[in-house]
Image (cartoon, helix red, strand yellow):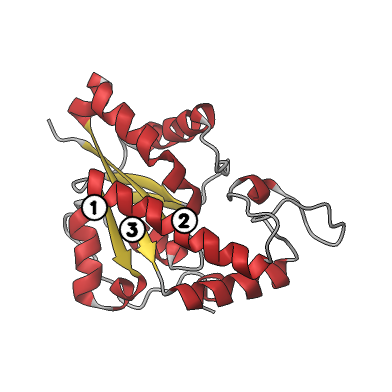
Amino acid sequence: MKKKKFVFGMGCGCCGTASLALLLNSQPNALVSHEMHPILPWILDEGTMQYKYGQLDHQSHLFDLVGDVGTYYLSYIGFLMKSLNEVEVLAEGYDFKFVIMKRNKEDVVKSFMKKFKRQRNNPLQNHDDPTLKVDEWDNAFPKYNGISLEDAVNQYYDDYYKAASIFVTSHPDNVRMFDIDSLNTETGVKSILDFVGVENQVVMTGVKKNTTAEYE
């Protein structure tokens, strides 16, 4: 029996996640979204994850590949892999792949600082600043209080990829990390698509879905 292919893309943010979604969604008979609603909270919420999974599963009989890309999926790798290994119907009929994008730390910090200033928000810290916007994204990030926002972004980056590396090591067949430069070469793009298991690949290089948020 041919297994249904699910892909969950992620990265700390400002690291090519939107471009990854565009690349994957451009493959033959694929349906891969970017930050499909509802936005997941950083703290594990099994109910909301199951709802989102149900949305994807509903489409899986129509497409060869379904998935979604969002920073917050890092918090859900353990839950999804546990489900895949312990639920018989999933183990026998589904294949989960987790693609983690990574970009140079200095560039990510600069991009986040510009992004937060432009959007007038700060999801990395608890605050009651009336000049800052508060929305669902405040729950989608961990919190780093008592330090500057720039230090918070630096710590978030370190924590994110430390946790990501653990999953890469513990689940090498399902979780893999790619540098953002992989999106700019045929070899790099093919390595991502090979890992996901895409057949009849459309190899697109230099894809930039969201230049302002991803690459500034």
Badge 2 amino acid: Asp
From the viewer's side, name the closer residue of 209 and 96. Answer: 96
From the viewer's side, name the closer residue of 79 and 23. Answer: 79
Q: Earlier in the sequence, mark 2 or mark 3?
A: 3
Residue 196 is marked as: 1
Give the residue pinned by disc 3: 24
Q: Quadrant of the N terminus?
A: top left
Expressed as whole percent of the image width and height from the top left, the position of residue 34 reads 48, 54
Query: CB atoms at circles 1 and 3 under 8 Å apart?
Result: yes
Give the residue pinned by disc 2: 159
Residue at image position (24%, 66%) is: 202
Q: Earlier in the sequence, mark 1 or mark 3?
A: 3
Left or right: 106 as drawn, with respect to 194: right
Badge 1 amino acid: Val
Expressed as whole percent of the image width and height from the top left, the position of residue 100 reads 35, 57
Element at badge 1?
helix
Say which quarter of the image contains residue 176: bottom left
Residue at image position (38%, 33%) is: 79
